[in-house]
Amino acid sequence: MTPGHWRLLGLGLLGALLAAWHSYGPFLFPTCCHELVTPFNQAWILLPALSWVALMLVVYARDPSGWMWKLVLLYLATRGAWVLGYIPADIGLTLNRLLQNVHQIVLGHMALAFPTGRLAGRFDRTFVAFAYAWVIGLTSVWLLFWQPPDWWNRHNVIGLWPNSDVAGVINSIALLGAPILAAIALWRLWRRWSIATPAHRRVLAPVVVAMPAALVIIGIWHVAEAINRDEIRVALQTPVLRLTELVLPAGFLIGAGRALLARGSIADLATTLGRGVPLGDLQSLLARFLRDPTLKLAFPAPGGDGFIYPDGRPFRTDERSDARATTPLRQGDEVLALLVHDPALEVEDPGLVRAVGSVAQLALTNERLSAQVRAQLSEVRASRARIVEAADTERRRIERDLHDGAQQRLLALAVRLQTAKATVQGADGLIDEATAELHAALTDVRELSRGLHPPILSDMGLGPAIEALAERAPIPVEVQVPDHRYTEAIESAAYFLVSEALTNVARYAGAKTATVRIRAKTQRLLVEVSDDGHGGADVSGGSGRRGLMDRVEALGGRVTLDSPLGEGTTIRATLPL
């Protein structure tokens, strides 16, 4: 046996001894026993006690370094304090009275700290500390004034100032405070439930169901003692009502057993993974298996800098927060993936997430490679988009330079030639020829500037710019364009697509008419240019058409060409908005 097994065995023996002491300890002393303390009745007490021992062992096996099993051990130890009253010595009676109600505070402590054994918030820590101080402190003060009746033949060793009236007042205050403490504990338990995530609620369910019954019975007991109604306390000690003590440890055990079943179903996960999981579906599969719909997977980025989602997008750093747990899944020293999940999963079953990661290593490796390929493709698309944007920026710069530089100088030169014509005799013909050449050069500059980036597109938008293209076309062109502005990249891509298409119609199609239709639909801009020419166009022909396809695809769009012989040509583009 390993050291861990020996420790578990030793803890089990200690728990069994405490359970036996709690149930049958009074029979060890000559002063035994009260009329209700019979071997039969005590058997009904032993069963819940052994349930607590079983819970302690299960919790210890799951998390030896945790605090929960220590609280269960403390509960078992303090629960047996009532037996100290049968010790035929004054100190036994005093210790019995001092510790007899501490186990009830430990019970509330366990409920609020479940399942880790640690209290989560400042209020809960303060409340539990106050509850311990209230019970132990008031009981200590009460013992200073209390002495048992003479016929008990024993004395309270710290009863320094015997006064039954003062002792009665203090005892009533302490007993009536118990229901208030129980109500606050129930409220805090409900508060934890109301703000818990679905996974955390699964963890808290046994406590939320069982604790109200346990605390109500404790509250009734103390009220009955405060008002001196012994018949109520006798009724609460009947075997049937004693069985209610099974509810709480049984609820905890059910929760622990459910976690063990989750471990057992890892084999089902392995079978599912063995049949193959489509790329992109692993995250949803793990989310269903771990019952955490908020679960997210992230993989190391291709360059090793940061992480990415399965679809290749950069991993958001805000996914890592106090409200989320991040578990690295490793293969040796290499991080295969990050699992971002509800922290309650590790609370419910420590190590379950890593166990799932071990089973899913092959699928995680495949998913990581797929995610890295997607990220690289996304980077290529982003790079193409940046290239297109840089080219558009350079075109706009050249257009401004031509408009503000060469074009203005040519206009100024034309004005000077007209002035020279009026003042110089005999040079009319020569000046007219120079002026004609100058206007031709000015027209070329304007056409070049318009081809680079038409000012009307930036100033007035896609609709007026397409209308201007149609007016310059050598054949009639019907235009249907919405009166709406889009992003600069989308408008440029749509404009140059239509411009190239109309140029090809004029040069090669032999068409009599053409139509341009642009419309927005479900976050997409649909661009369509059709003609009634002879068809037979090739989508891959010409560097201009290839460049337009690159421009559209760089924005995440798509271009298709429909050009059957003798039936005209239709070019369509879809641009994401």
Image (tube, rainbow, N blue to C red):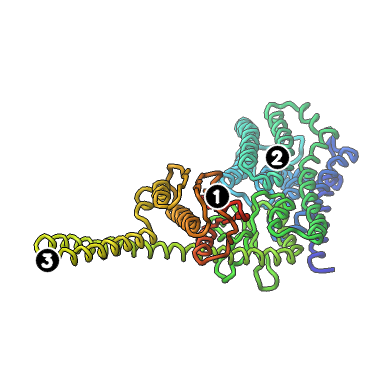
Residue 353 visible within the image: yes
* Label 1 Cα neighbours within 10 Å, binned few <14 / some 14-19 / many ≥20: some
Query: Marks 1 and 2, how far apart in space?
Result: 75 Å
Q: Which residue is mark 1?
A: 532
Q: Which residue is mark 3?
A: 426
| Residue under the point 9% across and 62% down | 423
Percent x, y of residue 74: 72, 51
* Label 3 Cα neighbours within 10 Å, binned few <14 / some 14-19 / many ≥20: few
Asked whether 205 or 50 is in front, the reply is 205
* Label 2 Cα neighbours within 10 Å, binned few <14 / some 14-19 / many ≥20: many
Q: Is residue 289 left or right of residue 167?
A: right
SS assignment at label 2: helix
- The answer to whether marks 2 and 3 mark residues whose Cβ atoms lie closer than 8 Å is no
Between disc 2 and disc 3, the foreground one is 3
Query: Marks 2 and 3, how far apart in space?
Result: 110 Å
Asked whether 471 or 34 is in front, the reply is 471
The correct choice, above or below, for 82 with respect to 539 in the image is above
Percent x, y of residue 59: 75, 54
Query: Marks 3 and 1, how far apart in space?
Result: 54 Å
Q: Which amino acid does the dot numbered 2 rest on? A: Val
Identify the mark nearer the N-term, 1 or 2: 2
